[in-house]
Image (cartoon, rainbow, N blue to C red):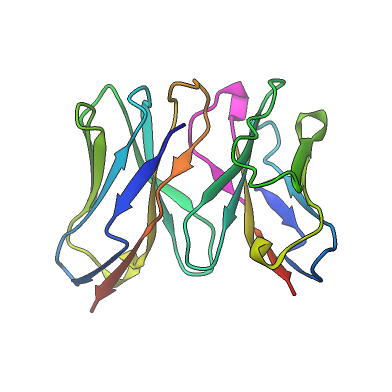
Amino acid sequence: GAGVSQSPSNKVTEKGKDVELRCDPISGHTALYWYRQSLGQGLEFLIYFQGNSAPDKSGLPSDRFSAERTGGSVSTLTIQRTQQEDSAVYLCASDGGRGEVTGELFFGEGSRLTVL
Amino acid sequence: GENVEQHPSTLSVQEGDSAVIKCTYSDSASNYFPWYKQELGKRPQLIIDIRSNVGEKKDQRIAVTLNKTAKHFSLHITETQPEDSAVYFCAASGGSSNTGKLIFGQGTTLQVKP
């Protein structure tokens, strides 16, 4: 696609429910990132996928968080048993057009998660 | 792992003045330092970047300087305009883990008063 696409754009859920957030990166981009941005806060690194390498999961805040990337393209971030502190905007970004990771991340619009 | 500290958290300047935002990083192996601008309600976008083999880079009214010895880098905006008002993030990557993982600073909210 023309840009990074994320869905849903908004998600309201009840505490304890599971949620799935989806990211479609720019076609051909080999690197995919998930970041979390709480209200008025910075960009907190969650997980990084690069090609066929094992993902860097060092930023996932707890074992309730997981992510996968199927076929080197679409990625899904799953949050199990959501808590109120999980409320944030989850941003996906991709990089690596023509197989080269340049460092210029192209961000999606984000998925705003609200846990009641 | 890499840690990036950014200062100040908020900055208010008069239109036409200069603005400087500073960042420090912890991993001496980091070699790529981009700056992103995030306007209210929008996604972050790259505005300028610098690699460790240069000390300064300029693009019109914005410039970035890098001091590898001190492990700090700065963003300079000259002749600020109201449309420069946004949140600015610095970042670093390419550290000892030798990946493209970008670690961001906490952000600086810049307000340019007309």
Q: Can residue A32 be seen in this view?
A: no
Question: Residue at the spot x=51%, y=52% of the render?
Answer: A43
Q: Residue at point 69% right, 42% down?
A: A25
In percent of the image, x 44 and y 25: which residue is there? Answer: B94
Does the magenta run of residues contain A34?
Answer: no
Q: In this view, does A15 lie above or below A47?
A: below
Coordinates of residue A116 in the picture (x, y in percent) = 75, 75
Residue A109 drawn at (x, y percent): 63, 58
Q: In this view, does B33 lie to the left or right of A5?
A: left
Please tell me whether residue A83 is drawn above or below residue A54 in the rendered image. Answer: below
Q: How many labels does the image show?
A: 0
Identify the magenta region: A95-109
Is A104 in the magenta? yes
Give the percent coordinates (x, y) of residue A64.
76, 48
Kindly report the secondary structure that dominates the magenta region of the rendered protein. loop
| Residue closer to the observer: B90 or B82 | B90
Q: Along the horizontal axis of the image, is A88 left or right of B50?
A: right
The quadrant holding residue B83 is bottom left
Which residue is farthest right? Answer: A17
| Res A74 → quadrant | top right
Question: Picture coordinates of residue A89 (x, y %)?
Answer: 62, 61
As drawn, is B41 to the left or to the right of A86?
left
Q: Nearer the viewer, residue A42 or A91?
A: A42
**Is residue B89 something one can see in this rendering?**
yes
Residue ID at (73%, 63%): A83
User: Which quarter of the rendering shows the C terminus of chain B?
Assistant: bottom left
Left or right placement of residue A54 versus residue B97 in this view = right
- Quadrant of residue B58 in the image? top left
> Seen from this angle, which residue lies furthest bottom?
B114
